[in-house]
């Protein structure tokens, strides 16, 4: 099925907010996130994209159905814990765009939508004058009991786009895993690329 991928308007963000929240909860329940989400938190979190003048939400539609979303925002408008990790690494926060999350239902994967998500966010970052693009990946041990046997990390895909992990640049963020009774702090590895440098 043909998928339409394009940024949402502010009006569409508002209309689709609960759909985006539900997609995040569904996809992030998978390894490596194992996120036990709730709609109230998601609504609060996503409202920050409506408040950030230069944020972007890219939607992927299969016909009328929203099947995936990708988010991004100026680094200074994202969670303070994330910005602090980059600041401590000596990266100029005001020159950095944060590619926050990409979620896509399993049946629509493998069709190049992940690359389109990055294309749209990086183009937006350049348009608002950002030099760097960054994101975080959650760190889980290789022997994690919920790691699927066929799990394939996205490291090769990210490196093909010109991103590299930043040694020692680790963000901390807490959420509740499945079957846990409380939130636990997770470590997330920062990846970054210079948007002025052509993709390899």
Image: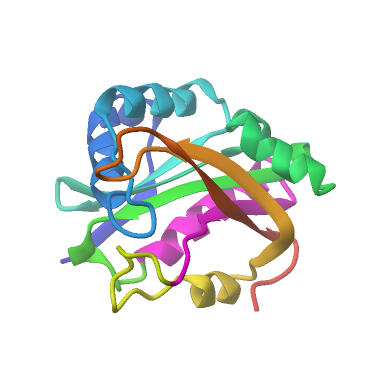
Q: Is residue 116 above or below residue 64?
A: below
| Residue 63, x across and y down, in percent | 15, 52
Q: Is residue 62 above or below residue 76?
A: below
Task: Give the quadrant of residue 17.
Answer: top left
Q: Is residue 96 left or right of residue 179?
A: right
Looking at the rendering, in which quadrant would you find the N terminus?
A: bottom left
Looking at the rendering, in which quadrant would you find the C terminus?
A: bottom right
Q: Is residue 142 above or below residue 182?
A: below
Q: Is residue 119 left or right of residue 103?
A: right
**In magenta stretch: residue 195:** no
Using the image as rendered, state which of residue 142 and residue 1 is in the foreground: 142
Residue 10 visible from this viewpoint: yes
| Residue 11, x across and y down, in percent | 34, 25
**In magenta stretch: residue 127:** yes
Q: In the rendered structure, which segment of residues is drawn in magenta?
A: 113-142
User: Residue, x 52% and y 77% (percent of image)?
Assistant: 156
| Residue 91, x across and y down, in percent | 80, 47
User: Residue, x 45% and y 48% (percent of image)?
Assistant: 101
């Amino acid at each position: 099925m043909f998928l339409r991928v394009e940024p949402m308007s502010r009006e569409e963000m508002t209309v689709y907010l609960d759909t985006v929240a539900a997609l995040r909860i569904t996809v992030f329940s998978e390894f490596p996130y194992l996120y036990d989400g709730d709609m109230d938190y998601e609504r609060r979190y996503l409202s920050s994209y409506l408040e950030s003048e230069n944020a972007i939400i890219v939607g992927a539609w299969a016909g009328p159905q929203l099947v995936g979303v990708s988010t991004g925002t100026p680094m200074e408008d994202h969670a303070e814990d994330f910005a602090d990790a980059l600041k401590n690494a000596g990266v100029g926060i005001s020159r950095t765009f944060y590619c926050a999350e990409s979620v896509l239902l399993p049946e629509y994967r493998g069709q190049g939508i992940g690359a389109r998500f990055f294309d749209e966010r990086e183009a937006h970052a350049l348009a608002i004058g950002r030099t760097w693009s960054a994101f975080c990946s959650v760190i889980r041990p290789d022997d994690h009991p919920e790691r699927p046997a066929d799990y394939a990390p996205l490291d090769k895909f990210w490196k093909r786009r010109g991103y590299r992990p930043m040694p020692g640049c680790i963000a901390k963020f807490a959420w509740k895993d499945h079957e846990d009774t409380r939130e636990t702090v997770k470590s997330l590895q920062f990846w970054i690329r210079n948007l002025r440098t052509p993709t390899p």
